[in-house]
Amino acid sequence: MNKYPIWKYLLILSVLAVAAIYAMPNIYPPDPAVQISGETSGTQISQSTLERAVDSLEPQGIEVIGSDVSEDGVSALIRLADRDHQLAANELIKEALGPGYVVALNLAPTTPQWLRDIGAQPMKLGLDLSGGVHFLLEVDIEAAVADRAEGLASQVRTQLLEEGIRYRTPEITEDNHVRIGFRTDADRSEARTLVLEQNPDLQVATEEEGALYILDLAYSELAIRDFEERALTQNLTSLKNRVNELGVAEPLVQRQGSNRIVVELPGIQDTAEAKRIIGKTANLEFRLEHNPNRSAFYEEFEFMDVTVGLGTARLDRDEILTGELVSDASTSFDESGRPQVNITLSSEGGTLMHRATRDTVGERMAVLFIEYKSRAVEQINEDGEVETILESYSDEKVISLATIQSALGVQFRITGAGSQAEASELALLLRAGALAAPMTFVEERTVGPSLGAENVASGIKSIQIGLGLVVLFMLFYYRVFGLFATVALSANLVLLTAVMSIIGATLTLPGIAGIVLTLGMAVDANVLIFSRIREELKNGAPPQSAIKSGYDLALSTIVDANLTTLIVALILYLIGSGPVQGFAVTLAVGIVTSMFTAILGSRALVNLTIGGRKDLKALWI
Amino acid sequence: MSIPKKVWDFMAWRKIAAIASIALVLASIGSLATRGLNLGLDFSGGTLIELEFVEAPAIESVRAELSNLGVEDAIVVFFGADTDVLVRTASQMVSNCESDPDVAAQAAQQGRVCADTLVNSLNASLDSEAEVLRVESVGPQIGEELREDGGLGLLAALIVVMLYVAMRFQYKFSFGAVVALFHDVLITLGIFSIFYWEFDLTVLAALLAVIGYSLNDTIVVFDRIRENFRSLRDVETEEAINISLTQTLGRTLVTSLTTLLVLVVLFLFGGEMINNFAQALIIGIIIGTYSSIYVASNVVLSLNVKTQDLMPPEKEESDGEFEETPYR
């Protein structure tokens, strides 16, 4: 007799019911939408602001199907009827709201509230399906370490000057040691004490070079490693801030390996904007304009003056502070209605700024913008072949040069920063944070939204046709049992979708291929069982015991065969990236769910329908 | 367990099959060594731009326009439809230059490709409307890393599988399974090399899936061989293998058929981006099905597998030298 206890039927049924519920959000396609948020994190979006935005669209014939402010009040979504209007709507709203707001394209979920309440969400779509950009950035840690050695040199120089110790200009070696020469041994030991007081973790060595007494300063291995770690974290944070500025739905900013960062922005249509903001691998420095009475060292930079035109600015060689110390920046209008940028520094930054500006009122201060770029250069490698490598270089320009009106502290403003757009961009760059180490793009992929939609369509079509053909074949070949297999296969599809949605897996094009492949392979378990049943019948076993031994005998084979495929999927996940990982995930999840439905599910069906019939003479198999 | 009425004498063909397999593997290795693989963007590095035109453009004019822009090494082909054009070049990095003509000029000077500039000038010169569907740019060091990781992944998969089969069955079976897998992977790679089809990340994923699938097949057969060894004591090894293959043949064919069915659907309807993947799997699965019958079992037979090899672990000490009778 083939019977399951009642609880087993109920268990299978409830698993499938839960799966069906959690798979459901996937059938609600998201609405194209425009998202509004404040430029600074504290800004609340009021109902009237939202109305102003909505009102700007209707005269242009753009149909709005819904608009609401988020629960915490910091962002609002305007849902549109037509995806083609998304870009136009974005521009119109930007214009209508003016400065102070970030307006970005988004996709609004249409999952019913009761589903959202229980945490049911649709599967995330990978970039190849939703369209969007993928960047892989490499952090140039070496440059950051070299930068730091330079900082040390300039700090020591200032110290020695203040104490009146005579020294030779410090030299920075290739391995980032700072070497300073002194005339006498006494000077050197005095300097040594002084430097160590400020930087207790430095490694100090002494050396004689002709008549010079050399002090050799270096950061310890541990300190450098610690610094590298912090630099990467700082870069990651800055990138996250910048990405948040874009207001993209579900962006991904993730560290990869020891010195790379992945940025993925799904669903965005206007890739240009994203590239511009993310692509600004930049740092900012505040420097005083050079004054020969103060110091002998200066550097010259290009400067585009609003009134004078292109010229050069002569700045102090040492910066007051860099962009890491800026904690907030926003735009507003000054008394005469010109745009201004309001800056808030961290307390450390405030102290530095105050120290630098208390005695320099009336002089000018510059904001120096340093952009790190890369270019392709051909070089000859060890084997004598010409290969193309990417060389990084930096592009430095002064973006603002303004007179210091009073001693500055934690909060101050920059006026005369040009147009409203320029002020906004300056604020954004200040706010989004600086990068502790320069970065270069080593990989970028852009998938247009239409290709993404096309991929989804062909993926769904493949699943439908594939499922149809497999079902036809199974019905033809195994008849009634083919029907059981079909039900199990459909349940598998639901279960697979539900598990993918629950674990928050990302669906990619190879992932869809994985689903289709799973459809083909998932029937394998049923095929194994059914052919075993057929054999048993041929050997003269009565139907009920044929069913029983068919399922029992095939079990170990199914487990063996599926476990090995699972291992392969795991390896695939570990070595793969992006889309390939998507394939690995669907393959692995598909194997597990198919074992559940093909073994337990189909057995339950068999038991429920014919398992209890003692008079069963033959099986339609 | 009884013997099926009609047992196919699969192993009668084993010598011919072995020769055919060896010939195919050698041809594959030969082609891989001389021609190599047509590495896709993921592995070679470079830039790829997919454009969709409203009206089918002439490939030559796209090519001419590219060399006007200073991109000399570009490969331009139709992709799927004659309005879809794929441009591939070894040049690096695409930056968004539409808004900034200076950047575009600079990019061209540095041998970089700028998608927007290309589209704008194509639109102007061809009097057509083109849309950028996809831009991918992979740096040379990334390509190299992916190549290394890919090779490593394949090796790791094979080693783990070998250990698993050795643990579940016995080392002779493990050896048979792994030889079959090498056979499948090498021949699939060989076919990609001979026809010079593009080998990209998705094809690598497909190869790993082939390993999983082929192993699946092989294990089903081995499972049956083990079962028959234990139940049919007075049957010769070769006969036992033939019986096992005959018993599993139906299942092997049905599963291969359903899998091939969905793969062909994927190949036909899945879109251009999935074509290579489907192609690799179709080939791999055909070869994998063949190899589970004629390579894995063949190797196991050549290794002179004995009933004792598959007795429960207590009887492990038998290594085939002493023909001791297992107790009944």
Image (cartoon, helix red, strand yellow):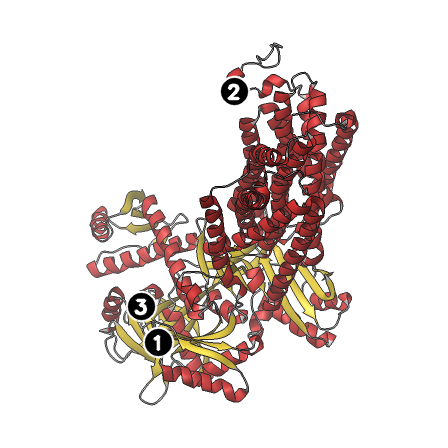
Counting from the top left corner in percent of width and height, residue A238 is at: 39, 63
Q: Residues within 10 Å of mark 3 (few under 14, many from 20)?
A: some
Residue at x 57% of width, y 12% of height: B327
A495 shown above or below A109: above
**Disc 2 is attached to a residue of which chain?**
B
> In the drawing, does residue A241 fall left or right of residue B128?
left
Please determine if labels 3 and 1 lie on a single subunit.
Answer: yes
SS at mark 1 in the image: strand
A132 shown above or below A578: below
Give the numbered dot on residue A305: none
Residue under numbered circle 3: A327
Q: Quadrant of residue B89?
A: bottom right
Counting from the top left corner in percent of width and height, residue A315 is at: 36, 70
SS at mark 3 in the image: strand
Kind of residue at disc 3 = Ser
Q: Residues within 10 Å of mark 1 (few under 14, many from 20)?
A: many
SS at mark 2 in the image: helix
Q: Quadrant of residue A538?
A: top right
Q: Residues within 10 Å of mark 2 (few under 14, many from 20)?
A: few
Residue under numbered circle 1: A330
Of the two numbered discs 2 and 3 in the rendering, the one whose residue sits closer to the viewer: 2
Give the numbered dot on residue B313: 2
Counting from the top left corner in percent of width and height, residue A215 is at: 29, 47
Q: Nearer the viewer, residue B207 or A437?
A: B207
Q: Is residue A183 visible?
A: yes
**Disc 1 is attached to a residue of which chain?**
A
Counting from the top left corner in percent of width and height, residue A156 is at: 27, 56
**In whole angstroms, how far apart are the C-alphas of marks 3 and 1?**
11 Å
Q: Nearer the viewer, residue B98 or A381?
A: B98
